[in-house]
């Protein structure tokens, strides 16, 4: 089955810097979503990008999608200590199951 | 409105005992998902309920795991004869079906001693 895999596994930056994390997947998708998880608890939806979209913005977040490379990136600009969390991508297949597949996540630490 | 709630938030049980985990989805959401997350790992899909359709149980790791959803709302995940490898955070999510964003509960941290 397809799977989103995030890269890097861990990222450590200073407050104010930008953070970029990537997600790769294997098969055709309907959409790709990014989620944030604090302290190993519930995930919070950040942004959804459809397969016919190439870029999407939400506040300090910028997501790109390259379906030819089967990859997506999440950019957090002007990071804050409160952005410290794990970030997951989830891919929804273009046919069949409605069950999204989550990657293992990128652990982001933003130092104040 | 109220989000997805799960109970208990933490559960410690002895190996071999049965446990029940509860999920209250957002009112009106037709789809409900259960996931398991081991320490430092991604989300492992367990089971998916959509309306009145038969649930997709393809992610359940063994026949010790079962789940039901009563009245299209509350769901209970039952683990029988718990093993130490069952220790994980169990997450529930709901949405209106389709390939849309999911709303997650805070999870139940299960520890099997």
Image (cartoon, coloured by chain):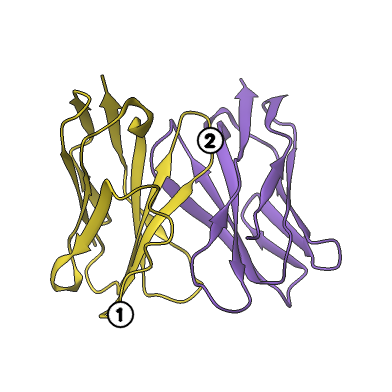
Chain colours: A purple, B yellow
Cα–Cα span, label 1 and label 2: 30 Å
Residue named by callout 1? B53
Q: Report whether residue A101 is seen.
A: yes
Is residue A77 shown left or right of residue B33? right
Residue furthest to the right in view is: A68
* Residue at 34% in and 34% down: B86
* Residue at 26% in and 19% down: B113
Rendering coords of residue B83 (x, y %)? 30, 30
Residue furthest to the front in view is: B63
Residue A12, quarter of the rendered image: top right
* Residue at 53% in and 41% down: B42
Query: Please, which chain is the residue tagged with disc 1 on?
Result: B
Residue named by callout 2? B41
Position of the N terminus of chain A by quadrant: bottom right
Q: Circle 2 sits in a helix, a strand or a loop, which is it?
A: loop
Rendering coords of residue A54 (x, y %)? 78, 69
Position of the C terminus of chain A by quadrant: top right
Above/below status of B57 relative to B84: below
Is residue B42 shown left or right of residue A18? left
Which of these two is toward me, B85 or A72? Answer: B85
Residue A52, quarter of the rendered image: bottom right
Query: Please, which chain is the residue tagged with disc 2 on?
Result: B
Q: Earlier in the sequence, mark 1 or mark 2?
A: 2
Which of these two is toward me, A69 or B103? Answer: A69
Rendering coords of residue A103 (x, y %)? 61, 47
* Residue at 27% in and 46% down: B64
């Amino acid at each position: 089955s397809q799977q989103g895999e995030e890269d890097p596994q861990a990222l450590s930056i200073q407050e104010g810097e930008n953070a970029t994390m990537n997600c790769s997947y294997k098969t055709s998708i309907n959409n790709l979503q990014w989620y944030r998880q604090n302290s190993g608890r519930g995930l919070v939806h950040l942004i959804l990008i459809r397969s016919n979209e190439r870029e999407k913005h939400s506040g300090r977040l910028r997501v790109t999608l390259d379906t030819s490379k089967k990859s997506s990136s999440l950019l957090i600009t002007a990071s804050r200590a409160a952005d410290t969390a794990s970030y997951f991508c989830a891919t929804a297949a273009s046919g069949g199951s409605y069950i999204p597949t989550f990657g293992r996540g990128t652990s982001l630490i933003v130092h104040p | 409105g109220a989000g997805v709630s799960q109970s208990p938030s933490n559960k410690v049980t002895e190996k071999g005992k049965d446990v029940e985990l509860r999920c209250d989805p957002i009112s009106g959401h037709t789809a409900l998902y259960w996931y398991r997350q081991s320490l430092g790992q991604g989300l492992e899909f367990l089971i998916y309920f959509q309306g009145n359709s038969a649930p997709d149980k393809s992610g359940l790791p063994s026949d010790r795991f079962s789940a039901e959803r009563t009245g299209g709302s509350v769901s209970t995940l039952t683990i029988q004869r718990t093993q130490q490898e069952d220790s994980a955070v169990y997450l529930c999510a709901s949405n209106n079906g389709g390939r849309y964003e999911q709303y997650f509960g805070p999870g139940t941290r299960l520890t099997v001693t």
